[in-house]
Amino acid sequence: MSAVPRTGDVREEICAVPDPELPVLSIADLGIVREVAVDEPSRRVRVVVTPTFSGCPAMEVIESDIRAAATRLGYQLDLVTRLSPPWTSDWVSDEGREALRRFGIAPASAGGPRVGGPVGVHLAARSVACPHCGSADTEEVSPFGSTACKAQRRCRSCAEPFDEFKAV
Amino acid sequence: MSTTSDTAAYVLGLADDALVYSHRLGEWVARAPQIEEDLALANIGLDLLGQARRLLTRVGELDGTGRDEDELAYFRDEREFRCVHLVEAPRSDFGFEIARLLWFASYQVELYDGLRHSVDPVVAGVAATAAKEVAYHRDHASQWVLRLGDGTDESHLRMQQALVAVAPYVPELFADDAASVAAAQGGVGVRPSTLWGGASAHVQTVVRRATLELPEPERMTTGGRAGIHSTPMGFMLAEMQHLARSHPGAVW
């Protein structure tokens, strides 16, 4: 797990809380932190988060880690869950996308989901680069993977399986 | 005019559909034809469970009882559940599951698309997130129906039998009841009957392309929204609820 920088700044430390299932990604890079408002006189911090998938079990850990960061620095936390507008994989930052790639996970293709179009055999329609060798010659194994946010693919060039961050 | 109790009853129906189907999907883990499918059905169940948790929490606020999601999920008896019979039907073969998922996900795609405009902020928020999830569910079921229907003679036969087996459960999903009519009038919900056109058009397209036929139901289930359930429901609840009831308040 990557070390979380301890800067002493409550906004920075909350933004740096790692995703417990993808520890290379901070919750800010994941795009779920929508607002952090610090009120120094009252030592309160208001954090607005938008969860990724409805059933993502990591959210409870993330909330408790945000609370721990605020408490450690002597702040009262007001945590707000905002569902609308819904999180989209387009909110993952460029740094987050690069971190995913280095971790062996293909970042989500930009521009939202691959589903919703006309019915058909469309599995070859998207080009997803292999995070290991960079080849674009990859295929989908399953649109569902080890966590709610990932799909499974394999590379036809280097033959390695890899996860893909789902586009939603 | 929508009353609070109508709204709560409507949202409870949505929540119970998602909760009960998530349990049935979870039963597939280690039983699906391949490990990728174990993961897929479990993930779909996980999405539905997440939707159910948020909706149940909202029900506890709307109905004035202050019950939390766990009290609603684990400490209600069978007659207090408002799910349709489709979702409580016991696990059968893989074809049946895929036919059920195709219908349910097609229904939910239309449902959450409509509910994004709900005047209830929680319902609208749940719908906005869930709309993207159920699009994946519908796509997954559609892909399987295409492969099985237009596959071998055996897979074609089994998929066709599955469509016949699921058909009696389908009309109940699109039937208006007092709670949904009131919720629609109040701007909180949508009338289930208005979702039929979009959902059935999708199913019909997939079924046709899979070289299958959409059967007319010979009988129809009814009563789920009024708390009247089929025999397997009690057994399912006994399994789903026994841990929470044997060890109230247990956490890990």
Image (cartoon, coloured by chain):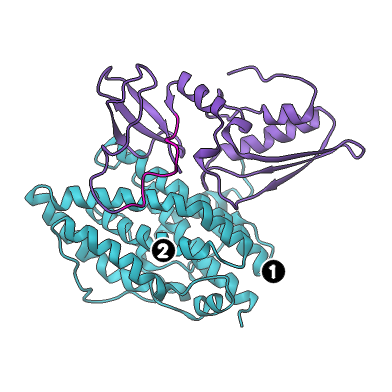
Chain colours: A purple, B cyan
Residue A113 lies in the magenta stretch: yes
- Chain letter of mark 1 equals B
Is residue B233 placed above or below A101 in the rendered structure? below
Residues tagged by mark 1 and mark 2 found on one chain of the structure: yes
Residue B29 visible in this rendered orientation of the protein: no
Q: Residue A19 vs residue B98: left or right?
A: right
Q: Is residue A164 left or right of residue B243?
A: left
Numbered tag placed on residue B110 in the rendering: 2
Seen from the viewer's position, the closer of residues A51 and B23 is A51
Q: Quadrant where the C terminus of chain B lies?
A: top right
- Seen at 53% across and 61% down, the residue is B116
Which residue is nearer to you in this view: B213 or B68?
Answer: B213
Determine the residue positioned at 41% across, 43% down: B43
Q: Position of residue A49 (x, y in %)?
A: 65, 43
Magenta span main SS: loop
Q: Position of residue B164 (x, y in %)?
A: 20, 65
